[in-house]
Amino acid sequence: MLMDADHSQLVLIDLQARLLPAIFQGDLCLANALRLAQASQLLDVPTWGTEQNPGKLGGNAPELKALCRQTLAKMQFSACEEGLTDWLRPEVSTKPPTGNARSLPKHLQKPAVAAPERNTVVLAGMEAHVCVLQTALDLLEDEFEVWVVTDACSSRTERNRDAAFDRLAGAGVELVTTEMVLFEWLRTAEHPLFKDVQTLIK
């Protein structure tokens, strides 16, 4: 199963500048998260951020935060417990427009065609064994397809990071790399944005 950019959303979890120096390969994690966010902008993939207890731990790296539609401040380790699911799957109003055909503008006279559901959630961030793990497992329960980008996730220790990946894989989460995500979103070298996305990798 390949992921499709038209059905994907990207969530950047707790990539807070104050925490990065304590994270195993934190610079690499941040660099790959930034590549994902930049590609998501090019390919029109909605990007969201979360920040754990930002009052004490500070905000996400500013270059990442600028690429997010919204950033969720949270105290729970799972962002789903604080409302992330509502952002990823907003309720669509089924209430028909009121008024008669002559009083309504033409674009309201026919039922609107629903936008494609974006049920694929790509996760990057930290810490892998806490906030990424708990958010991913809750998203699975909420019936999303969950993909965790291993080279854009980390923890304070390599052991905790790897233990998170083992548990996520066992739960049914797809483990991928940054380049896997980007090339699956593109699908072909003939994609009009292929060169722009390729530049992010080089």
Image: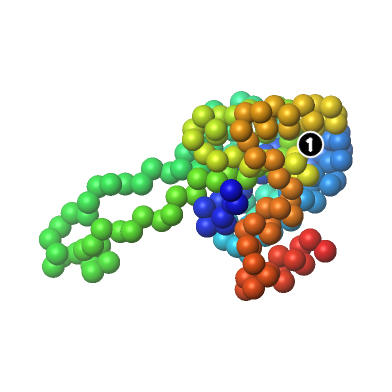
Q: Report the side of 175 relative to 158 (left or right).
A: left
Location of the C terminus (image quadrant): bottom right
Q: Report the side of 150 relative to 70 (left or right).
A: right
Depicted 60 relative to depicted 129: above or below? below
Depicted 122 relative to depicted 136: above or below? below
Instruction: Residue under label 1, please give it.
Output: 154
Along the line of sight, the residue nearer the viewer: 48 or 155: 155
Label 1: which secondary element:
strand
Along the line of sight, the residue nearer the viewer: 192 or 80: 192
Find residue 186 and report its horizontal and vertical position in percent.
63, 63
Along the line of sight, the residue nearer the viewer: 15 or 202: 202
Depicted 138 relative to depicted 42: above or below? above
* Residue pictured at 50% horizontal, 45% vertical: 119
* Residue pictured at 68% horizontal, 53% vertical: 181
Q: Quadrant of residue 111?
A: bottom left
Find residue 54 and report its horizontal and vertical position in percent.
69, 34
Along the line of sight, the residue nearer the viewer: 74 or 138: 138
**How dense is the environment of label 1, judged by Cα within 10 Å: few (below 14), some, or many (20 and up)?**
many
Regarding residue 178, the answer to whether it shows in the image is yes
Which color scheme is applied?
Answer: rainbow
**The residue positioned farthest toward the front in the image shown:** 1
* Residue pictured at 22% horizontal, 54% vertical: 97
Q: Give the amino acid at mark 1.
A: Ser
Find residue 96 and report its horizontal and vertical position in percent.
22, 51
